[in-house]
Amino acid sequence: MTVPLPVVFVHGLWLHSTSWQPWIDLFREEGYDPSAPGWPGDPDTVEEARQNPESVAGYGIDDVVEHYAALIETLPVRPVVIGHSFGGMIAQKLLGQDRAAAAVAIDAAHINGVLPLQLSALKATFPVFKNPANKRRSVSLTAEQFRFAFGNAIPEEESAALYERWTVPAPGKPLYEAASANFNPHSPAKVDTENSGRGPLLLISGGKDHTVPEVVTRATLKQYRHSEAVTDIINFPDRGHSLTIDGGWSEVARTVLTWLRKQAPEAGR
């Protein structure tokens, strides 16, 4: 009997891991074995996370990578890792370390070497950078800040509903680490982009994303130019940073499934 291929979903800042539930349901229907573990310190529910904001404070990129690497060690085979935003960076790091069979990085945060820094990205992350002490703290978004950073490409009512349903406090440290990545040769945001023996990678961007503009994803693609491994890119021109949780999530998810079947036809149905 063939063991279903595990798929590990990794959320980014300000979204709870349960926001992946529609993806989990779809991937299970398609024959995969999906799960969405939280980051270190993440409570089990959105409500608990809001009541205990400092439970995630102080965790950085390396902490998150090690956390997921330990979880992967318990799986029967190397999984596909699918990450959104900072989860997309984590997915790339795990793939570069040969801990994943394949990876999908959706609107992934800056990795080391990516230079474009758009004004919209600065505004989206200002709630963290406005106070240097936030590097050691957790930070929450207001509904208005979420609207700009995540929900700018969807109706205002939908953005407000997503904010109420999924948003949680997030650690500030990963953003500070990513911001200084190009000044630190040992940055935790560094990814092994030259690994030619790794599994395939799909980069996905949203053309209207304020937090991770499309130019960032295309600059990320260029970082892989010295690797012979499969590295693909797909753009959704009318989508923003909420593309994994808003009303159009299934289009993105099914695009990922189609790509996965091409890379590993034996996986899933």
Image: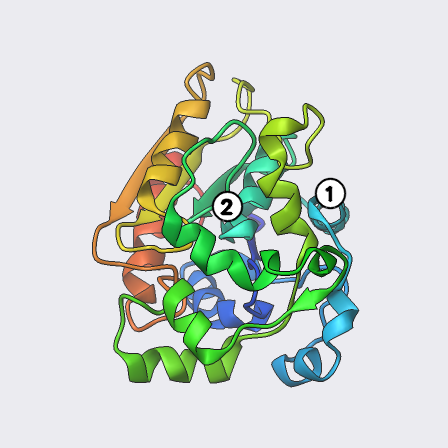
Instruction: Check disc 2 and report its element: helix, strand or loop.
Output: loop
* Disc 2 residue type (three-letter): Ala
Contact flag, marks 1 and 2 (Cβ < 8 Å) = no
Residue pictured at 51% horizontal, 71% vertical: 19
Residue 31 drawn at (x, y percent): 45, 58
Q: Residues within 10 Å of mark 1 (few under 14, many from 20)?
A: some
Instruction: Identify the residue shown where x is 72% and y is 75%.
Output: 53
**Which residue is identified by label 1?**
62
Q: For the residue carrying disc 2, how many other residues have a C-alpha within 10 Å: few (<14), some (14-19), or many (20+)?
A: many
Query: Disc 1 and disc 2: Cα gap in Å?
Result: 14 Å
Residue that label 2 marks: 109
Q: Residue 21 or 28: which is nearer the viewer?
A: 21
Q: Residue at x 36, y 45 (%)?
A: 204
Q: Residue at x 68, y 77 (%)?
A: 49
Residue 6 in view: no
Is label 1 in a helix, a strand or a loop?
helix
Residue 129 in view here: yes
- Toward which corner of the image does residue 128 lie, by quadrant? bottom right
**Residue 103: x percent and y percent?**
50, 41
The label number, if any, that marks residue 13 in the structure image? none
Residue 82 image position (x, y, % from top left) = 50, 50
As drawn, is 133 to the left or to the right of 98?
right
Q: Which image quadrant for residue 48?
A: bottom right
**Sequence-wise first label, 1 or 2:** 1
- Amino acid on which the number 1 mark rests in the picture: Asp
